[in-house]
Amino acid sequence: MTANYQKFFILNSIITLIIVMSSFIFEFYYELIPCKICLIQRYMWLLVFISFMLAVFKIANKKFISLISTIILFLLSLIALYHSAIEYGLVKNIFSCTITSGLDATSIEELSNIILNTENNDCAFPKFSFYGITLSNLSFVTSLILLLINLQVLKKILFNNYES
């Protein structure tokens, strides 16, 4: 049985669009400022969306798009796993996610104002959690599922078992 390449990438495009739009809703409606790793994940999701849209509109070769989207999803899964590991305290963050350290303060009052007026933007502290599941956990699970599905599709495309 063969599957339809076009429908597969339309569905993937819808899923990634929902993910990207949700990240903007969390940022602007709920005022959850993303950390640097969250922004990297968002840009990766945008790349995945663009690659899927290229496939939907048949702008590029389906083998090439499938390979590129699989690579991007693999990298996205690694970044999301790394971010989740940071949030759970399993690894130390190698990126600087904080904006200011307060070391340039000249008085205790100035340091106190810096501390009180600085938003927590550290990657180690999740800003949203639902039953212990953070947004980076959701990103990891979603990207991993899409990666596994895309690997199956890539295999079918490479062996010409997929309809155009």
Image: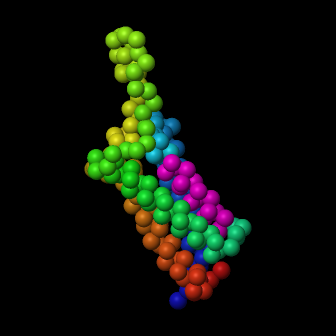
> How many numbered markers are drawn?
0
- Residue at point 43% right, 18% down? 104
Note whether 154 is above or below 27 in the view shown. Answer: below
Q: Name the colour scheme.
A: rainbow
Q: Nearer the viewer, residue 58 or 36?
A: 36
Q: Which residue is most to the right?
A: 59
93 shown above or below 106 = below
**Percent of width and height locating residue 18:** 52, 55
In the image shown, does 67 or 31 lie closer to the viewer?
67
Residue displayed at 42% across by 54% down: 80
Q: Looking at the rendering, which quadrant does residue 35 occupy?
A: top left
Q: Kindly tell me whether residue 42 is visible in this rendering.
A: yes
Residue drawn at (36%, 22%) of the image: 115
Q: Is residue 138 left or right of residue 6?
A: left
Over which residues does the magenta segment extend? 40-56
Residue 22, image x, y percentages: 49, 49
Q: Main secondary structure of the magenta part?
A: helix
Q: Nearer the viewer, residue 106 or 139?
A: 106
Tell me the quadrant of the picture where the C terminus can be found: bottom right
Q: Which of the 4 image quarters holds residue 101?
A: top left
Q: Is residue 66 left or right of residue 77?
A: right
Give the x, y percent position of residue 73: 50, 63
Q: Residue 28: x, y in percent?
A: 51, 37
Tell whether position 65 is magenta: no
With respect to residue 95, does 145 lie above or below?
below
At x 49%, y 60%, the residue is 75
Q: Is residue 32 visible?
A: no
Residue at the extreme bottom of the image, as rendered: 1
